[in-house]
Image (cartoon, grey):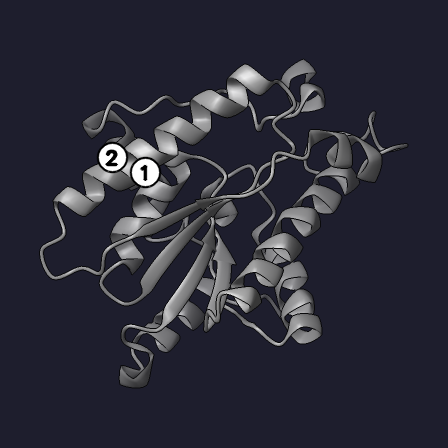
Amino acid sequence: MNRNYSRELEEILCKPDNKGKKLFLHSCCAPCSSYVLEYLRSFFSITVFYYNPNITEEPEYRHRVEEQKRLIHEFNRELGTAYPIQVIEGDYQRELFFERIKGLEECPEGGERCFVCYEMRLRETALRAKEYGADYFTTTLTISPLKNAAKINEIGERIAGETGVDFLPSDFKKKNGYKRSVELSKEYDLYRQDYCGCIYSRKQ
């Protein structure tokens, strides 16, 4: 039976005792985070964790992380009743990424290499969330129509069981989430890359 992760998230957001709880949000890039932050910042106190060792070219990495910080700065200027958003940049570990995906270089995009990458980023997010005393962790990755939301949620829930930090289920592309992220990217003039980040994605 296919799960409706979007509905599961809505049910969690409806619980009044979750209001203002701490969410550690892994972000892959500013455009993907735009809708997610717009959607969740009235419910949670969010720390964006930018950890993407899969971005294997350093100038590209630096460009994306600066765009992420710029977007959060703009969002915090327009707070209204929303909670302020914090941002933490993780270590840039591209050599660790190459080590983890060794032997999977020729896998097709969206396959096993990507699953290893999801796990790498989600695990580091969960560990940091635990260190910072967050109530939940999740990722912006499910906003992409090209990402396997079921697999991302499966990995997140398994890591939650191992670390003791609750995973927030999601399928952010639902309810026009991806469409809204494109609109927000235009509104804030965000850099929208045309590949995931690794050299294998770029080749494909």
What residue do we see at 59% from left, 66% from top?
2
Instruction: Please name the amino acid that badge 1 sits on.
Output: Ser
> Is residue 165 in view?
yes
CB-based contact (under 8 Å), mark 2 and mark 1: yes
Classify the position of the C terminus by image quarter: top right
Answer few, some or many: residues within 10 Å of disc 2's Cα (few below 14, many 20 plus, some between 14 and 19).
some
Specify whether 153 is left or right of 13.
right
Foreground residue, 173 or 51?
51
Tag on residue 64? none
Residue 14: image x %, image y %? 29, 78
The residue furthest right is: 103
Answer few, some or many: residues within 10 Å of disc 1's Cα (few below 14, many 20 plus, some between 14 and 19).
many
User: Does 39 sit above or below residue 10?
Assistant: above
Residue 72: image x %, image y %? 28, 41
Foreground residue, 105 or 175?
105
Residue under label 2, please give it: 184
Measure how far apart labels 2 and 1 are at the Cα level: 5 Å
> Is residue 168 in view?
no
What residue do we see at 49% from left, 20% from top?
194
SS at mark 1 in the image: helix
Residue 186: image x %, image y %? 24, 25
Tag on residue 181? 1
Residue 118: image x %, image y %? 65, 47
SS at mark 2 in the image: helix
